[in-house]
Image (cartoon, rainbow, N blue to C red):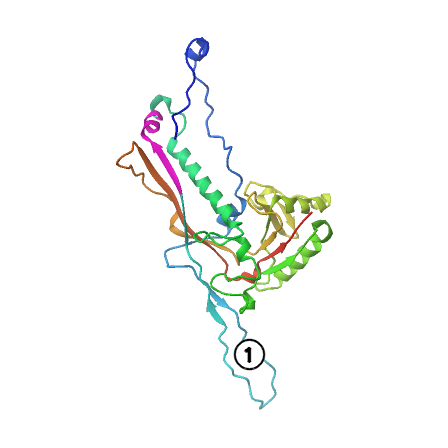
């Protein structure tokens, strides 16, 4: 990191006003970097589960029906046993963000010249960076080997997730359908997806619809005035939302154009280790530097125990 930029002093640069009067520094740091991490913040607020320890995350999964039928009097009954129970498994993922400070900045940010609390400001910056990284990974087409699983991979009709392959276990496939032009086919495609997912146990409709700004605006453009907007208290995450039927629709600046996700709150969980939930480590000073560094750490996993309750439309265009 280079030396701080200072005012140019001397005659012609600093006059009597700047010599005798301090700058009026308004409180707070203005964020000119980060976008709204809508989906991660929604999941953190509505679908977050704290868990203590464990080598991985797992659900008990029901996939097979028992035997039932009609009979009369002395008919033989089918007593064939049915298993129908298994487990999925999801790995923990670890994330970090650094907070570093050199000794000069630490000593300069003290006493009468201190404007903002440096540590709190840098902690906020690191937490926002970590949230942004997680939001980006939520929409990754191909998740990194150490990253959380993404919506693109979990909400799919193919591909092994939670160590269950939907090719042989068809009950593990999410709903997926092509849409094409939203103006021509968007509402019918959404209605079909919505109804198909609503019929699957638990037999309730999707809880959240997620897309990029493009798909959000495609939908907004076809709405009649009286059903266009709802109040922001519906999903309190900082971006205005719409509704499709009774389900809130939000968009993320990190989402990739072309897909619309329909998610169910009983089939998506953000599981966070309660002893590593955005914790801040102690500052450590290297032996050969006048500086110190700490980390914000979180250990978590994005999981589903009922993959088929989630769905998506693909190939969405205007």
Q: Nearer the viewer, residue 27 or 6?
A: 6
Left or right of 228? Residue 234 is left
| Residue 3 found in image quarter | top left
Q: Residue furthest bottom?
A: 74
Q: Residue at x 37, y 34 (%)?
A: 119
Residue 152 lies in the magenta-colored region: no
Q: Is residue 265 visible?
A: no
Is residue 24 depicted above or below 274 in this figure?
A: above
Q: Give the mark count.
A: 1
Q: Residue furthest left?
A: 287
Is residue 108 depicted above or below 122 in this figure?
A: above
Q: Which residues are magenta?
A: 97-109
Q: Residue at x 32, y 35 (%)?
A: 292
Is residue 281 depicted above or below 313 in this figure?
A: above
> At which x and y percent is residue 17?
45, 10
> At which x and y percent is residue 83?
48, 75
Left or right of 283? Residue 222 is right
Residue 98 lies in the magenta-colored region: yes
What residue is shown with label 1? 67
Neighbours of disc 1 within 10 Å: few (<14), some (14-19), many (20+)? few
> At which x and y percent is residue 304?
50, 59
Q: Nearer the viewer, residue 102 or 230?
A: 102
Is residue 76 depicted above or below 126 in this figure?
A: below
Left or right of 164? Residue 182 is right
Q: Nearer the viewer, residue 312 or 273?
A: 312
Q: Nearer the viewer, residue 167 or 18?
A: 167
Q: Quadrant of the N terminus?
A: top left
Give the secondary structure at mark 1. loop
> At which x and y percent is residue 294?
34, 39
Q: Is residue 95 visible?
A: yes
């Amino acid at each position: 990191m280079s030396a701080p930029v200072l005012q140019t002093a001397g005659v012609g640069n600093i006059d009597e006003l700047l010599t005798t009067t301090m700058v009026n520094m308004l409180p707070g740091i203005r964020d000119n970097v980060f976008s709204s991490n809508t989906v991660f913040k929604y999941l953190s607020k509505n679908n977050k589960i704290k868990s203590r320890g464990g080598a991985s995350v797992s659900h008990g999964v029901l996939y097979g029906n028992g035997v039932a039928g009609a009979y009369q009097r002395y008919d033989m009954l089918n007593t064939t046993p049915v298993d129908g129970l298994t487990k999925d498994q999801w790995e923990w993922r670890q994330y970090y963000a650094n907070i570093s400070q050199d000794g000069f900045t630490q000593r300069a940010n003290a006493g009468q010249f201190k404007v903002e609390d440096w540590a709190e400001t840098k902690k906020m910056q690191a937490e926002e960076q970590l949230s942004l990284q997680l939001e980006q990974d939520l929409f990754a087409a191909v998740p990194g080997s150490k990253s959380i699983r993404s919506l693109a991979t979990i909400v799919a009709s193919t591909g092994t997730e939670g160590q269950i392959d939907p090719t042989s276990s068809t009950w593990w496939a999410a709903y997926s359908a092509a849409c094409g032009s939203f103006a021509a086919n968007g509402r019918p495609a959404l209605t079909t997806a919505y109804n198909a997912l609503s019929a699957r146990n638990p037999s309730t409709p999707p809880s959240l619809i997620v897309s990029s700004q493009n798909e959000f605006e495609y939908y907004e453009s076809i709405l009649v005035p009286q059903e266009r907007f709802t109040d922001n208290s519906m999903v309190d995450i900082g971006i205005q939302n719409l509704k499709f039927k009774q389900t809130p629709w939000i968009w993320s600046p990190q989402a990739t154009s072309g897909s619309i996700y329909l998610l169910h709150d009983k089939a998506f969980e953000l599981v966070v280790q309660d002893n590593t939930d955005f914790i801040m480590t102690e500052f450590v000073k290297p032996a050969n530097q006048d500086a110190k560094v700490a980390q914000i750490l979180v250990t978590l996993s994005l999981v589903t125990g009922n993959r088929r309750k989630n769905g998506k439309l693909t190939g969405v265009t205007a």
